[in-house]
Each structure stands twice: as C-alpha cells, then as structure tokens.
Image: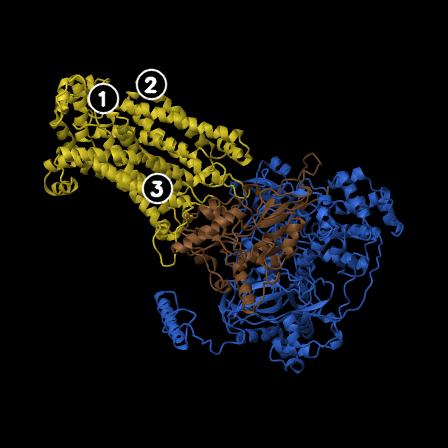
Chain colours: A blue, B brown, C yellow
Amino acid sequence: MGLKNINRRGFLKLMGWSGVGATVAGCDMPTTVTLEEGKETVTSYLVPEEYAIPGIGVWYSSTCRQCPAGCGLHGRVREGRILKLEGNPDSPINAGKLCQMGQAGLQGHYNPDRLRTPKVRKDGKLVDITWAEALDLIDQHVGASSGLNGARFAWVSDSVSGHQAMLIDNLMSALGSKNLFIHEVVNSEVARSVNQAVLGDATPRYQIGKAHAILSIGNDFLGTGDSPVHASTEYTEFRSSPRGVLGVVEPKMTLTGANADLWMAIRPGTEGVFALSVANVLATKHKMAIDMLPKAIQTAIMKRNLNEDARLTGVSGNHVIRVAKWLSSNPGRSIVMVGGTAEGQVNGYQNGVAAMVLNVMLGNVGKTIVASHEFPFPQLEHRAGGTAGLLDFVKAIDNGGLDVAFFSGANPVYTAPAALGLKDKLASIPFKVSFTQFDDETSQLADLVLPILSPMEDWATIVPKVQGEEAVISMQQPVMEPLYADTRGLGDIVLDLLKKRDGATYGNYDSYYAYLSQAFASFPANMAADGKAVTWNDALAKGVIAVKTGEKQLKAKLDQVAVALPEENAEYPLTLIPTPRLGLWDGRHANIPWLQEAPDQISKVVWDSWAEIHPNLAKQLGVETGDAIKITSAQGAIDVKVYVFKGIHPDAIAVPLGQGHKGYGRYADGRGVNPLEILDTATVDGTNELALYSTRVKVEKARNKDTLVMMGDHDVQMGRKMVSTVTPDVFELTGGEA
Amino acid sequence: MSLQNLLQDWSRYRRGREEGGFHNYEHMWGMSIDLNLCIGCNACSVACYAENNLAVVGKDKYEKHQAMHWMRIERYWDEPDLGEGRVSEYQQHGASFLPMNCQQCNAATCEPVCPVAATYHTPDGLNAQVYNRCIGSRYCSNNCPYRLRYFNFYSYYEDSWPEPLNLQLNPDLSVRDKGVMEKCTFCIQRIRVAKDKAQREHRVLQDGEFTTACAQTCPTSAIVFGDMLKMYDPNSTNPSSKVIELWEKHQVELGVTEQEKHNPKIRGYRVLEHLNTDPCIMFLDRVREV
Amino acid sequence: MTTDTRDMRNIQEDYSKDINEDIHWAKINEDVLRSMENPRMGYWIAVGVSLFLLSFAVIAEIYQYNTGMGPSNLNWPHMWDLYIATFVFWIGMSHSGTLLSAILHIIKADWRKPIYRFAEAMTTFSLMTAGLFPIIHLGRLWNMYWVIPYYSDRGIWPNFRSPLVWDAFAITTYLTSSALFLFVGMIPDLAICRDNAKGWRKKLYTALSLGWRGDDRQWRNFRKTYLLMACFLIPLAVSVHSIVSADFAMSIMPGWHVTTFPPYFVAGALYSGCAAIITLFILLRYFFRFEEYMTIAILEKTCKLTFAISMVWTYLLFIEFAATWYGPDAVDKELLIGKFTGPYSPLFITMIFLGSILPLTLAFEKFRRNIPMMFVVSLLLNVGMWLERYMIVTPTLSLSYEPFAQNVMWPSWVEWFILLGSFGWFGLLFLVFVKIFPSVSMYEVKEMIFHRRHLANKEIAAVMHRRLDDAEKKPSTTTPEPGLEGA
C-alpha cells in the first residue's frame, strides 16, 4: 500500500495497527505507566485542551523574572508544556533577546527541588499542612484579631513592581506597618542616590547606543547592570560604525571589562581619584571648560597631579591620557558610568560624584544621559532595593524586635554577611513566613514555608527597573498549568490576606487573575502610548503595554566632591571583591543546572567557586591555578581554589557570588563558598548601603590541592587564527555601510 | 540501491567534482559571527542547551571533559599585537571570545571517515548527524580540527533531567543515548518546521523567517544565520539573505581555501580555513582600539 | 631421549648449526607429539594466569557495555586511546607469522622451519585479539555489523570512503587467509598426529587432516597451494597494516596525516612481530624442551632479522621527524616538540629508547646467545612498540589545531583491564593451540634435516630426489633446490 493511493479504509487500518503497535511497544517498557495501573489518566485529544495543539508549538508572551530588568518573553508551549523561552521582540527592554539567565528560567520552573506543599515547623521539623491551615496560621498572627502591632511586622522582599507591589503596599498599610524591606545584593543603589542628588533622577537612562565613547568605572552594564540585555542590545549600536570606544576601569575584570578597548586595573577605592585625574587632563590638556562646576570641585580637579594619581590608583598616566582623549573628542556623545566595584566602596558615593563631574564637564547630561520617563502609575513603579533593606531589617530586629516577618524572593540568610548575625537574630522573631519556590537558607529557618507558583505559572505585571525608549508595563502570564496543585501565586496569597483585612475592597476578586484583569478593564485609554484602549487580550498577546509618559529634563546640580583614599591596612592588605555574575547572579540561580554548567565568562570555571588573583600575587603566595588558598577577613575565612590571570589588580582578590549554598536543592547544595559570609559591615559613606567591595582580607596558601573544573585547556591561541583582532580603521573599511 | 541509482549517483558525483561541488543543494545554511559584537555572555550556549536537549553532565564528568556544549564560548587571553609592543602587566584589551559551534563545513573532514555514513551532507548544505545510524566509532570527532563533536559517554538522560525537568525536553528532536556522537545541527528541527510551512503555503522560504536558537537569543545580535545558496549558486531561485550580504561585504567566499580580498585587511575569515574544510561560518574580526 | 643427553647437548650446543641433522625422524615425531600431551603444572598455571587476565577484561567490558564509554576516561578530545593503540599493536604482532612463513619461505630461508608454526599461530591469534578492539571501542558495539556491507531493504551501505570500513575488510580478509595458511601448512603434521592419537583427538585429527596420505600427488598439490598462499599473504599483510595506518594517515590531524605512515606501520608491525617471536621462541624452547629444534643458531638469526627491521623502523621514524621539522606545518611541528617536551614525553622518550637504542644489543653475538637477556630484550622491544602506538594515537588527540580542546588524559582502570585482558585472551588461545596442534612443524623439520644431511652427502640426495619418471642423471649436475621440491 503506497502512501499516494491510501483510501479511508486503508487509513483506518493503518491507524488501528499503529495503535496496536504503540500499545504493544508501550507495554514492553516497564517504566511506562499503563492504564491498568491507573497512575495516569489518559486524556483523549479528540477534545483537546485549548492550549494544547498536538505537535504544534504555541507562543505566549510573558515577562522574565530572573533578574529585576523585566525583559519580555515569548514562551513556546507544546502539549501544555513550556519548552523554550525567547525574547519578546515587542519589548523595548530586550528587543527579542535574552541572556543566559532568561533562557534558564525554564529550569527554575521545572526544578526538581521545588517545594510542593505548605509546611509548618513543629518541634524543629517541617511538616506538611494544608493551605487552609497555613492561611489560618497566618491569620492568627497577622489577622485583624491578632492584635499585631504594625511596627513589629516586617516583609523582606526582592525587587517588586506592578500590581504585586501595590498589593503588598496595601497589605502593609492595612497592617499598619512601614517595614517593607527590599533587598538585592546586586544593585545600583549608591549610583542611584548619586543620580538622585546630582541629576534629580535616580534612574536616568544611559543611552549607550548613542554614545561614541564610554568610560565605565566599575559598572558591569553588560553583565550585571540594571538591565544587561537592554545594555547589550544598545551595545550593538554603540559598536556599529562609527564604532564607539569603551574604556573600563575596575579592580577585577567583569564581562564589560572583558570587552573593553582598554581595560585598566585600579586599586579598589581609588576610582574617584581616577575620575578627577581624567577631569584634570581634560581641563589642562584638552582645555575643556570647567567653569560650570562649583569652585570647590574646580579646585579639587586642578590640584590633581597625573603622576601622583597614577601612583595612588595603579592606572598608568598614559592610560588616563588616552581615556581623556577619547572622552574629549566626543563631548556630549560620551558616557561616564559608575557602578559595582566603584560604588561598593566606603567612599563609593564620592566616586559616583566624581564620575558625574566628568559627565557634566563633557556635557553628557541631557544628551547621552537622559531623564527617566515620568511614569504615570507611581504605585506600580519598580521598587529597587539594595543592601540598605537588609541593614534596616536587622536594625528593626535590634530595635525592639519583630513579631512576624514575611520573606519573599529575597534570601537574606544567604546574602547577609555573617557579621550581621542575622541567623541568630531571626530566632528572636516568633513567626517567620517564607513564600518561596525552594528550600533556601531563609526557609530553613522559617516557621511556615509556603510554596509559591513559578513565574511560568503565575500572573503578574512587571515594570522594568530601567525603561527603554518607551516606558512599558510588561505582562507576566502563566505559560502553563501549575506543575503542583498545592502551590499558590504570591499575588493570590496577598490578595487573600487583604480580603481578610479589607473585605469591602477586595472581596469581589476571586483571584489575583480576576484582580488583574479587572485592573486592565479600567485601564484609562489615554494612558496608553498610542492612545488606544488597552484590551486585556491585546496586552497578553503583545506582552507589553507602552504607557504615555511625561517629559522630564535633567539638570545637573553639583556641590562638592571629596575623594578620600581607602585606609591602609597592614594586617589585611588585600581587598575582597565578591563578584556578581551574569549566570548565578547573587546566588538565586545556583540551583539551575544549565547555569551551573555554563562556564563563567571570564574564568570559564563551572560548578564551583574560585578566587581570581593576579600573577604577581600568585607568585608571592607560591600558588598557581587550581591551588587552594585561605582568605581571611576580620569576620571569618573561606577556603577556595585560585584562578590566576592578569585581569585583576594585585591588591584585589575576587570571589564570585552565587555558590556556597547550604540546602537550596541538589544542584546548589554544598558547592563552593559564599564570599558574602566574610564581608565587613561597613557602609558606603553618605548612604545606608553595605560597602560590598571594601572588605580587607589576607590570603595564605592552603594545603589541600584540587583541580579547578573549567572549560578549555589553553588560555592562548597558540598562533592559530582563532580570534583575529584588528584596529578600528580596518573595521571602518567595511563598517561604513552597516 | 539499484545499479541505476549507483550509476546516477556516480555521474552526479563526477559532474560535481568537475564543477567544483555537489550541485543539488536546496539551501546552504550559513552563519556570520561578528566578534566585534560578541561579548562572550554565554546566552547562545544556554539557549542551545534549552533548544537541543543537551545533557547537563555535572561537575565530575565536566572535569573529565565529557560535557556536551554544542555551542561553546572560547575565551583566550592572548593580547593582540596591535603595534603597541611590550607586554602589559594587565589584560589591557580584555578577553577574546569565540563562539564555536559546528562549522558545517562543505568539505567536512568528519564525513568521509564515518564507517557507517552516519554523518553526511544534506541537500541543505548541512553536515548532518544521524543518531540512529551512529555506532560510536568516534572517528569523526577525532578528525574534526575544531573539536566540535561531542560524544555521549554515558546515558546522560538518566541523570540529566530528573523529574520534572524532563518536561522541558524539546519533542522536536531526540534525547541521545550513550554511544552516539552529536553536534550542533543549526537547529535542524527549526529548519524542518519552517521548510514544511513554506511548502504548505506554496512559497519560497524567506530570509529571517526563522533562525537558530543561538542567533535568536544573542543579546548583541552578533550571530546572523541564513541561507547562502544564492551566493554559492547565483542561478538559484532562493532569495538573498543578510548572511550573504555580510559574506559578500567582507569578501569571504565559499569553496575557496584562500580568500582573495581587494584589501587583505578587510575583516572576515573562517577559522582554520587553510585546512580546506570550507566552513559555512564566517567570523568577523574582533576590533580593539589602540 | 633422556635428560642426560639433552644436558650434554646443551653444553656442547654447536652455534654454527641451525639444527642437529642427526636427529632421528621418529624422535622428531616423538618430541613434538609429547609436547601436546600431559600438560605440566606450569602449563596450568599459565592457563590460570591467562584466564585471570581475561576475566579482568570481561568484567571491565561488561561494565563498559552497560555504562557507556565514560568510565574508560575517554573524553573530548581523546575519543580514541588505549583501545585503538592496542588494536594497532596486536595487528602489528600479527605480521610475525606472515613474515616468517611467507617471506622466508619464498626466499628459501629454511631456518624458519622449526619456528614458523607457532609464529603463524601467533598471527591468527593476535588478529583475533586485535579484531576485538575496534569492536570494544565502539560506543554502540551491538550495532557493529553495520560496517559490513550487507543487503538491507533500506538501501543503506557502509561508507566505503572510511578507513574503518577498509579496516574491517582488511582484517577479516587477513584473518581468514592467515587461518587458512596456518591450517594448510599443518595438514601433513595433522596426519602424523592422526596416526598417533587415540580417542577424541583421533577423530579431530582425522577430520582435520583431510585424508592426507602423504602420496606424491598430495605433496605436489600441497606445495603449490602453500606457495601460492604465501605469495598471496605477503602483499595482503603489507596492505593490512597500510590500511591500519590509513586510519591515521587519511585524517587531517597533525601527527596522523603522515605520508610515510604505511611503510612505517609495516616496519613497526614486522618489528614487534619478530620481537614477539623471540619471546615465544624462548618460552616454547624452555617449556617444551625444544632445545633441539629451537636452537640458539635460529634464535640468533631471528635476532639479526629483528635488528635489521628495527633499524628500518628507526630510519622511518626519523624520516617522519625530519619531514615534520623541515615541513611547513607549524601545528605539526608543535606536536613534535610537544611529544618530546609535553606531558607524554617520558613515554615518548622511553619509546625511542626501547625502539631504537635497545635493539642495538641484538647486534652483538654475545648478547644474542644469552637467552635470558634476549627474553627480557624482546619483551622490552614490544613494550616499546606498544608505546609507539600509544604515542601515535594520544598526543595528536591532545595537541592539535583547536587550542581550547587540548587536555591530557590518562586511561582509567577499565582501559587497562581490557588491555591486560587482551594478553590473557591471546595467551589462552595460544596455550590451547600448543596442546592441540603441533607447535613445531614436524614434516618441515624433517625436511630441513634431510636437506642439511644431503648438503653433506649430495649423492644420497640426488637419489632421494630422483622421481620415478626422471631420466637418469649424473648426481653432480643437478641439485634440486632444498625446500621447494618434495622431501
């Protein structure tokens, strides 16, 4: 029977026999669940679920929740399963692109270590309870009849935005509490406060694509910045003809530093000196005007001495001159960015101000650095957080204590330096509730652990931390049915709690979904960017809603700059850089096998922690890549293997964030070390942020030797033309038409 | 396999030899990877894991070099000689990143050595690997100068996707068992879907209609994927593509061992081109300011 | 023969004579047949050791079959390692028999006669060992038959361009041919065995001797067949190892893509084969008390032959170095330097020492006559030749074009077990052989003795050689060539 002359009868026969064949084949396999065993319901596809078209992938829009950037997603769903994530081309944040963390969102969702049932701690052990019991328990502690004093309630969360943020706010005010602590380790809070003070706008938009010269002082915008994918898409434009030039000055090479035209290692804490040194060269050598600056700053600039500064910072004067040349030839088309290692110093705030002095001198403010959108719904806006949230939380425990604490998203037990003593202090809180997908360190100390839906199963609205060309609200919709029946969305839970407090307002909403769709039904048409009414289905289909925004202008207001030098410390000569990574981020993705197996961009190490040190330091210690060292700070010590390379200042030692979990699932548990543990608790002067990159340490060779598991065997190309490098003039030979 | 087929194949092969290639291509998929734009962020690699059911092998097997990274980002530290002379104390020009996936060579060295013809050239210009046919002699991998073929040293599926991670597996392609070789396929499952769709709609496959997982996710759009048949065979009715534009602009030609450029400095090269493997992936030189 | 006389003879052994031509033919039969019976304790210990070694391999292979190739430490880019190196090594060993039997037969070197039988057996058995390795090393060995061209209704054929397919053809051809050659050469002896055996042996030998009566016609056909097969086998043996070398030479990798590989491999094969013959020669001489047949004089000749081949091999090795050194391929040169200085350099330098320096001992008569020393030297030569194969396979995988995939890999216990097991397997086959088949060719030793005698007394020889229908000739004019004409 050929395929061409198949008739109905033949077709039926074929179907019949294939069915028999499939059944027989199925019976043969001992692992297959058969109908007889009744372990699985067999569903006929004659009446398929609306979302399941056998064999055909359907794409749903949603929003990535792997970091606070809020990239738009398209998720491919087949037979009811989400299979692949891609960027949403309609999102102005990521324009159809995704980073590795975004790609790996799937493995957070399908993670085998997700919590599946609510658990309560009884006699020190977690035991299963039902949701009804769990909610009753919460009600006992925070309900109207509990007599909870709002000041003795705290909620520690990661960055939130959109309607969840609004609901949480409403719940907080219903409880009479102001203790919502937003905590993120990878943050830009110091730079934001500098921006707020100098420009009057905490999150101005750095238009990387429009710049021709960028000087990044510790800001890893491509890797761990506010919106890495957005920055990367802009980077494409920045590097296209005419090709922009990127200088990066930082103690430890980040992903951005790895892509710099000129990478300069700087002694940690001297970034402000460097910035002023550049300003000095601009003013003296390139005769750039500085009269728009206040007198105090003018003096500060003019008294810098290139050679002296080079000695202080470790960046050679030639490099300062080169950077100054690049910047001076692109006034108004350059950006000086500060972040990461520069802002996480005790003098980080002043480093930020010094960088801003450069931007003002170069006339970048208002050109490449433009005001953020005047977002029309302040209640939905992104709540960025830093370590101040953590410190405030600890302070709240210290000052009078807390009765109830909620944790969602954040994992402060893991991210808090041991010196804060958070672990012990938590014991003083009688009732701790953790809303989490995983058994993280904080949940291990919680009294009630409530498994929440993954971002692939839950509803939300996300307002990105940094907006693109257009301000948007990004929609997060479930792309598949919840994997576990006994998990609930955070929005639903908050709504439930609100209903109990304020039935009149929230009683009408069956669920968070109902609440959201209701909110969109009343979305004012004139608030949409295109002036058309936003329908719920359109919003979901497109994934993003562009909103109408007000105009804002930036106006720089500088006062003074005082760059102090870091203190000498003979006992602890080195500075520890706990490096965030595009991958494991602050440790929240350590349970994702793809990201554990994806080599670190710089060291190419997988599944482990390591310490990056300069060859000079390695020589001094007598170690080479793979040897173990002991890093000791005043707060404790960690043992870690070294990776020796020239992308770090000899006075610095970098240990990546992300590993060293205890618990947090099979992929994260007991792997590597957590450098946050041995951090000092000094704060950045002028802010309440931890000076994350200022901890002084000493190192010594440890005895145990092990290999560092990494991809790749040679660091050099051995004369093969693997990566060929040319100069920009060669680039322009063909670049012009691009 | 009849005598007639044999003779036909032979005559076609002979003609191909004389005219410098095998001439019944339907497509010739190719890539351009701009190292000026590649930031080495690894998104392509993870996207590949997600799309192609790549097994996660774990630390111990990774240490033994038994991992399955079809798309790997190589990172080199050598400083380019840009006429600055002396060696710096620091990594002044950053890192050199090189995304390496199967180069889909037109004169692939892996193909002739496979004893069972499990790897062969498709009419799509792809260097295909037939998992079912592979007996695991691993000769192909030994003969790949780029070392881009990965072998299933274990039944990785037993440990790589504990439930419910297995639900993520892409049903459009198989999960490989121990003893077979695998490598980048240019997301052949996506190619198939797009071709089928175009065929059903009685139209020509358009450039940009679909792309590979790595190219789609690449945050800096450094990877461009498309059909290069028009470049290879000017008489082809396939539409031109962005890849062809890039190859032509950078004066890199398929089917030659040494590129003849008007200006030898012009960017664009193929890795280990002198081995005459005729890869379908062109790299554009990394650029660094002096 | 009594122990006394043998001891006497040992003391008085005449190094100028290949064989004592005074041995009675009946005694030859007696000695050889005796060697096939009543195994001594030593034999059972040898069988035990072989089985023990083999069991290692069986355990390792079962584990590997069930788990995959991972436990062997094979990795990216070390996709081949000990398995292929050992495969080439055993293939090399197999060239001994062909060399002694066929080449020396054609060039009429009759000293080969007492020792060629076991050498031929070695050919067959080392091929049977070698053939296992490409199968063991397959990731999916249950599908190994796919390399054989057979009619399939899917129209799928093996890839005839692949040297691995050529290997499969070459090895199977060589195995059948050498097994046949061994068998054909044994027919007259099997008839002797038949005439002297009882019980199951009688039945076995009756069947195997194919009705050999030793009449003139049979002898003449036998001679022709044997010669023909010898002529056929020589080019075959050369081609087999050339094809094995094609596994490497046809590739694009540095250190493999070498034009001189075919002769180099053939030389290496003959070399290791000869060395192995010396080893087994000494073992058999000792165990079976074959001092009268496997004489020091023959040992010396074998040693000289080995020495000559070792020098050819050394020459070809240095040609390869020179070609690389003066050649244009930088990567190739890098690999050569890497072999001398890299992580594998101790092995590589040991290989050069064992393969090129140590054989110089064979140039000295004093050493050649020292049996214990020759035993050790022959073993070391083969260690060197094994290292040579290992040093062909592994450094190239470790050091090639791609800088990112250049690691050093050491084999795991699985690979070592299988390697050891291969010696057990070979030993077992050989041990079974020597107890079932005559390991010294009785009829040819008789021939040899006869010719030696007739060299002393040509008139007798002439009479003996005269055929019935020959015209009466003067004995002094024609002396039939020894060896080619019937005994």
Q: Is the residue at mark 2 from the same chain as the one at mark 1?
A: yes
Query: Which subunit holds the residue at mark 2?
Result: C
Judge by depth and name the residue closer to the eye, C480 or A353.
Answer: C480
The image position of residue C99, as x and y in percent, is 30, 31
Judged from the image, the secondary structure of the residue bearing numbered disc 2 is loop
Three-letter residue code for mark 1: Asp
Quarter that holds the C terminus of chain B: top right
The image position of residue A725, as x and y in percent, is 66, 43
The residue that label 3 is drawn on is C170
Cα separation between marks 3 and 1: 35 Å
Q: Nearer the viewer, mark 3 or mark 1?
A: 3
Q: Is residue B44 left or right of residue A545?
A: left
Which mark identifies residue C364? 2
The residue that label 1 is drawn on is C18
Three-letter residue code for mark 3: Ala
Quarter of the image for residue A487 reads: bottom right
Judge by depth and name the residue closer to the eye, C41 or B109.
Answer: B109
Q: Is residue B181 left or right of residue A306?
A: left
Kindly check if marks 3 and 1 are in contact, taking CB atoms under 8 A apart as contact.
no
Kindly check if marks 2 and 1 are in contact, taking CB atoms under 8 A apart as contact.
no
Three-letter residue code for mark 2: Phe
Residue A564 visible in this rendered orientation of the protein: no
Q: In this view, does C174 lie above or below A557?
A: above
Judged from the image, the secondary structure of the residue bearing numbered disc 3 is helix
Query: Which subunit holds the residue at mark 3?
Result: C
Label 2 crowding class (10 Å Cα cut-off): few <14, some 14-19, many 20+?
A: few
Q: Which of marks 2 and 3 is in front?
A: 3
